[in-house]
Image (tube, grey):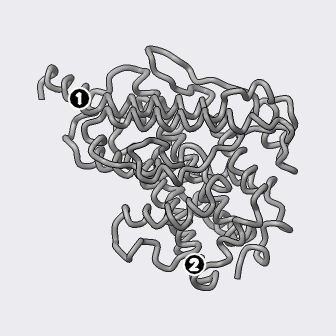
Amino acid sequence: MDKIQDWKVYQDEAKPVVELMKSINAGYNKAYEYDRDKFDKHEPHIEGSCHRLTESHLSRISPIEKGGHQYWGDNLDIIQKHVLYHIISQVKNNRSDIQEFFRNRESNKDEHFNPAFRNLTNAWRDEFALNYPFRESEKERTQTAEWRIIQMYYSVYKSVSAIMHSKFEDIRKGGKGTHNSVFAKHRTECMDKLQSKLYVFPFMYFPVDSNPGSESAFSWEVPYPIKDEIHNQKQKQNKYAQNALKDIYQASQESEYLQKNTFFTFYDLLKRLREWAQYQQGGIFNRLYGKTHIKALDHALRLISYTALAIAEVALICAFGFNNFNKVYDEFRKSCREGESYSLRLISERFKIYSAAFHPSEFNLSNSGR
């Protein structure tokens, strides 16, 4: 492919995808950071975890804007902490409802345990592959941009599978063996039931008129410490998130490949994005033009994967108890230290926070199901 043709293919095929990544980065900024500076003096309300989520971790940050693109730079770790803080807060506030949801599972706990954690530990490896090499630049990782998108997707898909296996014997709607059927059942049987108690931005319904599932859209909560008497902040924060979801949806429609589909939720969009990366014309990303494109793509993919993993991890803590989660993590940790220790990096940081946030008396075996 000559350079002129290569540039045209990149502009037509790849640039809309990079623009989508840009809108996702911007969406995280709107959903998690807007108005945070007005309230960040309040103390964190995750008991026992303040030493892991300090005031500096909870203070407002902003992505870097350059050339019309947003990426996180050194703030990527902090926005991830903000996401994790919100997920843990919601789970702690809704612990009884989430535990009751998983307690009413189709078989006994032991039969659900292995397939659930098999999917979760596989997702940990996908997240590692997406983020590796940790110490190299975004350019180094995005040399295989198509595979980075695929790795992101499978970390998300296996996270969903882990949640589904925690409750259901057959995770597919109607027993059909497709990813679409998994997401369809997950949407009606998990997302519609738990809503913002477990699921956080951007893993929500798209609130657009063309989405037949938009009537099931659930609201966004305030993602930082706030006093209860500030009543209107939830409405304002929800508007920020809903507008960000609309922007992401509209950005997806700029891709000729993606615009042919109806996306109920962000999960559905990622599935179609993976198909584009896996089956469209090879060489689209042979030249990933521009540093800001590279950074926007790399940071968005890593942030998406991190969010999906955190949702699944706290779900399995509720479903099986923290002690069981700890045992699986300990086995994974030992295998990493005997082999590739870098693959422990991200989950080990989250595990430290889970250990501080989830007290065994609340998140133990007897309280998490039959």
Classify residue 192 as left or right of residue 129: right
Checking the image for residue 112, the label placed there is 2
Give the class, few, some or many, for how many residues have Cα within 10 Å of label 1's Cα (few <14, many ≥20). Answer: some
Secondary structure beneath dot 2 equals helix
Report whether residue 345 is seen: no
- In the rendered image, which quarter is residue 82 located in? top right
Classify residue 219 as left or right of residue 289: right
Look at label 2 and name its amino acid. His
Give the Cα separation between the discs numbered 2 and 1.
Answer: 45 Å
> Compared with residue 27, is residue 306 higher up or lower down, i.e. above or below?
below
* Image position, residue 174 (x, y; %): 38, 75
Q: Earlier in the sequence, mark 2 or mark 1?
A: 1
Look at label 1 and name its amino acid. Asp
Checking the image for residue 12, the label placed there is 1
- In the rendered image, which quarter is residue 252 located in? top left
Marks 2 and 1: which is nearer the front?
A: 1
Checking the image for residue 114, the label placed there is none
Classify residue 100 as left or right of residue 72: right
* Image position, residue 107 (x, y; %): 58, 85
Residue at 72 percent of width and 44 percent of height: 85
Report whether residue 202 is seen: yes
> Compared with residue 130, is residue 4 higher up or lower down, i.e. above or below?
above
Where does the N terminus fall, quadrant-wise? top left
**Nearer the observer, 338 or 351:** 351
* Image position, residue 346 (x, y; %): 61, 47
Residue at 61 percent of width and 27 percent of height: 74
